[in-house]
Structures are given as C-alpha cells and as structure tokens.
Amino acid sequence: MADTEKKPIKINPVEKVKAEKDGLDVIGHLEEYVEAGWENVEKSDIQVRLKWIGIFFRPVTPNKFMLRLRVSGGLMTAPQMRAMADVIQRYGDDGSGDITTRQNLQLRGIRFEDFPAIFKTMDEVGLTSMQSGMDNVRNLTTSPVVGIDPDELIDTRELIQKTQDAITDYGKGNRKYSNLPRKFNIAYEGGRDNSIHAEINDLAFVPAYREGVLGFNVHVGGYLSAQRAQEALNMGVWVPPNDEAVELCEAILTVYTENGLEEGLRTARPKARLFWLMEKWGMELFRERIEAELGRSLLSAAPEDEICQDKKDHLGVHPQKQEGMNYIGLHVPSGRFNAENMHALADLAEAYGNGEIRLTVEQNVVISFIPDDRIEALMQEPLLQTFKTEPATLERSIVSCTGASYCNFAIIETKMRALEIARELDAKYDIPERVRMHWTGCPNSCGQAQAGDIGLMGTKTKKDGKSVDAVKLFLGGQVGKDAKLGELVQKGIPCEDLPEVLGGILVEKFGATLKSQAADSESAQESIAEAVSV
C-alpha cells in the first residue's frame, strides 16, 4: 500500500448496520414484518432499525415491545392520552405507560402484531413516534408551563414544533438527520428556572437580553454517559427567538453528521456525542464550521442569561398568567401510568381544564386552564389520592429510569425500589427541604443520576460472598440558576443497606431529623435489645 493511500476508517458495529441500510428504510415494511412474525425478521431490523420509528425490542420481555412517542415539549391533549390508554388497556397488567426525563411517553407490553393498528390510531389523534430512538434527535423539551407561566419570557411552543418538523420532515422521516453519530438532545427554555436542565443537553437555548433585545444564549455539548458526564458549554452565541434558532439547530446537526466519520465519532460509540467533536476542534473552530454551514456570522452571546430562579417542580396549584386561570401539577409515582389512571387524567383535563396535559422532566403531569372556582372540586377527585399535589418530601422528587424489569441495559430494578425506599425514609424523617433523588439502573444514566442532589447508579457488589444489587452514590448535583453535576463519592453500596446510608446523608447534609414517633420506636427497640442482651 502506498504511503499516500488512506487506510480504511474503522466503524463500530452500529455504524455497520446503518451503512448497510438506513434506519428509515423500515418505513412501509411494518405490515410485512408483522405478517412474517417478529422472530423471522432480520435481526438488525428488529433490534436496531425499528427504533427509528419508535419500536423497541426488549430481550427481557420477548414479544412485549416498547413504543416511544414524540411528545415535543411534553404537550398532549386529552384525546391523545385517552387513545394511548386504550392501546395499553388491552394488555392488562403487562400494559403500562412511562413518562420519561425528556417529557415523553413510552408504552410497554405491546404485542408486535398490534403495531399497524396502533400507528393508525396515532395518526388519527396527531401523534408520531418518528425518529424517536437510536441515532436521532430525541424528544425536544421545554418548560412544562410554556405559554401559561407568569414569569415566562419566551413562549417556545412554535419553535419547538418548527424544530421537530424540520428534523422529522413533518413526521414523514428525514434522512438528512437520521444518521447522526449518536443521539442528540435539544431543549428550549423560555422561563427563568432552567426547567429543561440546559446543562445536560447537546444543544440548549436559554433566554437572554442582548443590547436590550430578548433572545437566546446558546449552550452546547452537555451529556451524561458511562464514560463521562459533561456540562454544556456556552457557545458564545446569541440568536433571536425565531427561525434563526431552528436554522442553527439544523446547521449544528449537519456539521455533526457530516464530520462524524472523518473525525472518528463513528469508530467508538462512547466518544461519539457532540462534545467529543467540540473537544477535538475547540470552540473557535466549531463555531467557524457552524457559521460556514449557515453562510453567515453569528452574533456574540449576551453577557448573562435570565436564569435567575431555583428550579420549580410545578406540583400543586399555581396561578397562570391568564387571569382567573390556574394550573395544577400532579405527582405520578416514579412516572408510571396504568390505563385506568391515564383515562382518569384525560377526563379531568377535559372536565376542569381546556383538555391540555403537560408532561414534565420530573416525570409528573400538569393540567392547565382550571378556573378559580373549579379548584376546590378538582382537589376532591379520586385520582388526586393517587396523583397527589403535595406528596411527601422524598417521594415528591424521585426521578427514575425504567429499570431492570423492562430494560436489558439496567443492572438493577429502580422504579419500585426508589418508591419503597423514599416512602420508608419519609416515614422515618422530617426533611426540611426538597431533596431530589435520581435513580438510574446502569451507567448510561437515563435517570440522570449526576443531576440529583442524591444520585444512585445501578451496579453489582459482593456481600457475604454473594453478588448483590448495589449502587454508586453521587452527591452535589444542582439544578436551576446555579446548575452543576454531582460527583461520585462512593461505589458498591448494597441496595439493602441504602435506607441506613441515605438516612445518614439526609441527617448530615440536608438537616433531616427523626420523627418523634420513629424516634420513640427506635428508642423502644434499643431498650428491648439491651434487655434481651442482659
């Protein structure tokens, strides 16, 4: 081989699958696959490419597939929620819906043969799952109270929709953005409390005044992974809140896609996120490449942004900027729905509000446009005994990934364990402040462990000579105006020891105290133990 001849560039196994056939090539073949039976379809189509249209095969639950929707900004209607409830209702105990940390909805327990009918139902109510998985732009996020927040600076709903339409070609599938080196997260913040977690998005827009004009400062490169947790960096760019923001999204995605092979992003998937390209080039060259793609210079960033509030969780009753109207935030334990409470939620949204249902990154829901004189009646509804407006301190702020029950990547079960431990600690301690506890079942950090006040990441450890479920412990994550990622402080804590370990942390770092009843009970138990030992 001549010295001048280039060696072929090695690509990772997923890139080989995509090189053979684009993920969007499965469009139009679903009924053919159903007729053949999922077991007889090409493995790379079933396990990889179908994710481009939102269908996820799960080895831990064969023929119980997951469907990931695209619910941009978490904005749904009651008819949409009711239709998705109908979808999972037919599967009984196996059917469920999960709110994700990207304001999205995932349906579980679905039989493969039912997908054509489900997609028809989705079309009828205006829902899509196009390009919702794998190496695509994931669900776009914004404030869950967009358009109704009294403190709002920018109503981002139109921008969110325009960005999704550009990325997915109005839900038909867009090959220009269907072969990114890895997944890509975009968020638009129009409020003052950083509800979107700008720091962990590949591309985030946060409100800022530049020379008296309101627009967005742009942050790039944030992500969480097994190898690295990286806070987004200020790009040094400001854009107005119009089509220029959408065009910037497209330019960054194009540069990221077209340089992925040459710059090594398609060789090792752990180093394929946008940040690795930025790190290799440096911010100055990265910006130059984006400007070249746009064909124009970008304006410099505003000196400071308008994120000046602590992050809200939006639970409880709050006045809207529309006079006489309110929104109410309901806590969904671990973000998991069943068909019955999805139906009940849709009914309440129509009976008391304007039919809107808003999903939050904390995996909860918001119902909007409730008149002042209807609040009292709404608070008496049976669903609010399950989806509470003011849950106990720890339970209130649980965030959890799917866990081992459904996800083959998860090392431990998370959702039910998170609830059980939170309820145990809530019953034992008075905790004077909100403590956000984030659970993730594996190092991929879908539960965003590094973003929590307390973060717990699934692993295994040895106890009494046996392998047991365990966690890595992260502390110090902050959200809102002074957002930062938490740090790993301890590895290999057996899950069975967590109540004691977390109790100590709550007392030491968050000012928790034993409840009198619990303290009396402990004292009594200690007295009994002493008496027995004597």
Image (tube, rainbow, N blue to C red):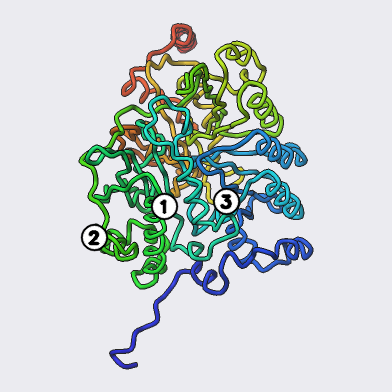
First in sequence: mark 3 or mark 1? 1
Residue 315 image point, x, y percent: 49, 23
Nearer the observer, disc 1 or disc 2? Answer: 1
The answer, for residue 460, to whether it is visible in the render is no
Give the residue pinned by disc 2: 282
**Distance Cα–Cα, label 1 vs label 2:** 23 Å
Give the residue pinned by disc 1: 246
Of the 4 image quadrants, the one containing the N terminus is: bottom left
Q: Residues within 10 Å of mark 1 (few under 14, many from 20)?
A: some
First in sequence: mark 1 or mark 2? 1
Q: Residues within 10 Å of mark 3 (few under 14, many from 20)?
A: some
Of the 4 image quadrants, the one containing the C terminus is: top left
Residue at 26% across, 59% down = 297
Q: Is residue 40 left or right of residue 345?
A: right
Residue 265 versus residue 450 in the image, above or below: below
Residue 343 image point, x, y percent: 70, 30
Q: Nearer the viewer, residue 138 or 370?
A: 370
